Image: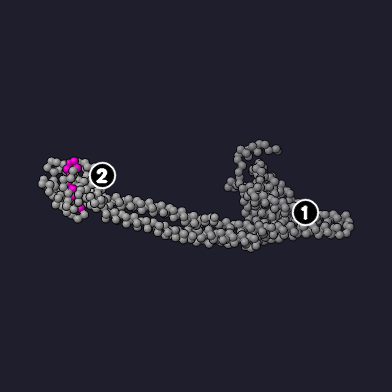
Amino acid sequence: MKPRTLRLRMMLLFCAVVGVLLAASYLAFWVLLTREVRTQINRQLLETARPVVADLSADVTEQDVNQLDLPGEYFELLDGAGRVLQHSKNIQGQLDLEEVSLTARERVFGTATDSQGRSLYLAVVPFSQAGQGRFLAVAIPTQGTNRVLDRFGRVALFLWPLSLLLTAAVSSWYVGRSLAPLAALREHAALMARKVTHREGFWSPLPVASAHDELGLLAETFNKLLQGVDSALRQLRQFVTDASHELRTPLAILQGETELVLSKPRSTEEYRKALEALDGELQKLKRIVEGLFTLSMADAGQLRLAREPLYLNEVLGAACALVGPRARARNIAIVQDFGKQDITYLGDEAFLGELFLIFLDNAIKYSPAGSHVRVTLNTADHSIRVRFEDQGIGIASEHLPHIFERFYRAAPSANGESQSGGLGLAIAQAIARAQGGSIECQSTPGAGSIFTVTLPFDSSAAEAASFQENRVP
């Protein structure tokens, strides 16, 4: 059995609801029409009976009713016991009033039949004649009224299925038009699946017929989602390409050095130099692999940083001491301005040290000999700011938006040193974000760069006081 489509289910539901509403509306209208017709007939019967009752109440001869012969109107005069005293000429026999309950004080409306079996609408009006209770029965045929009601019923029975057919046609057209964006979404999904299979471009925008209804908003949402997925896939492919390129060079050097050493016997000094070269390349591979691991953990939201009380000025001072020999070897001075007051912080000492080393290493790498690197630590606006200012080659404005991308290099180093794989600033940004901070860069080509790390000052006064008391001199 073929499953019902959403379009068919919506159309059937719409037709069922409309059909029930139409049937209820026709039935209610028919009941109201019937009631209104009966009300008008009763009013007509009373209007017909009023002058006759007035004449009978004033005249005691009781001969008036026998003289009445009005087309389509029938009269009977009854005594207080319900016996027929007179009737109009157009009545053959007498009216059947067995189903009518006579009361001396209230008018009674109902139906009756004549001697020929014809159905009549009836009104019985009580009145007094010469001190005696009398009833005047007035009747008219029901044939014309029933014909009108029957005609309305036939018209309603004809219009009901016709209305359902029109509703089905309109709902089918409208539902199909409303679901067109979903069909376009399905076609685009199939197209994108084929593109991914054939390694073609991934994303193409969905058409938005109306940006203000639910389906238009859905299409726009999918466009944003697919655009983000496409961007992520492109970045992933570019990342794999760049990572392969970065790993290829040291692996090629390792293979070349190994083949060269094994090609013939070497002296001890030659073996030592070869091993030093191999060790240098292995260190590069290690840094690249560790950087990729750190970034993958950050991307997965699993970069867990400890929250331990520490002094940032000590961590920053230790990082400056580590790069001191390299700076002195290139005649670069590291100027430290940490202030006189220790700054307490809750964070991960190892990752913060790595964060500071990245900026110090880049400042030394891209600064000319004889320059200086200024490192500043201070607090402002409930945050901690660590500033690294160098006098290096600077970064052009077109490169600034991309410097935190993985494997992106804005410029070669000033001393010709090999780069660290283009992951340093990306790792620094991941660590800063994991600590709840941010990084800003200001740079002028030929004048130098300023990197500012902003960390939230989240340690309470009690924690800081406890840390100060427990600090070992």
Indicate left or right for 399 with 106 as reference: right
Of tags 1 and 2, the one toward the viewer is: 2
Residue 225 seen by the camera: yes
Residue 353 screen position, x and y as percent: 69, 48
User: Which residue is found at the position 12% from the left and 47% from the top?
Assistant: 62
- Closer to the camera in the image, 459 or 49: 49
Q: Nearer the viewer, residue 417 or 27?
A: 27
Residue 396's x, y, as percent? Answer: 64, 61
Sequence-earlier tag: 1 or 2: 2
Dividing the image into 4 quarters, which one contains the N terminus?
Answer: bottom right
Question: Is residue 134 placed above or below 252 in the rendered structure?
Answer: above
Q: Which residue is mark 2?
A: 99
Q: Is residue 291 left or right of residue 273?
A: left
Disc 1 marks which residue? 282
Q: In the rendered structure, which segment of residues is drawn in magenta?
A: 73-82
Q: Is residue 216 above or below residue 471?
A: below
Is 289 placed left or right of 124 in the picture? right
The amino acid pointed to by label 1 is Leu
Q: Name the image quarter holding residue 425.
A: bottom right
Query: Residue 29, position in %: x, y?
Result: 33, 52
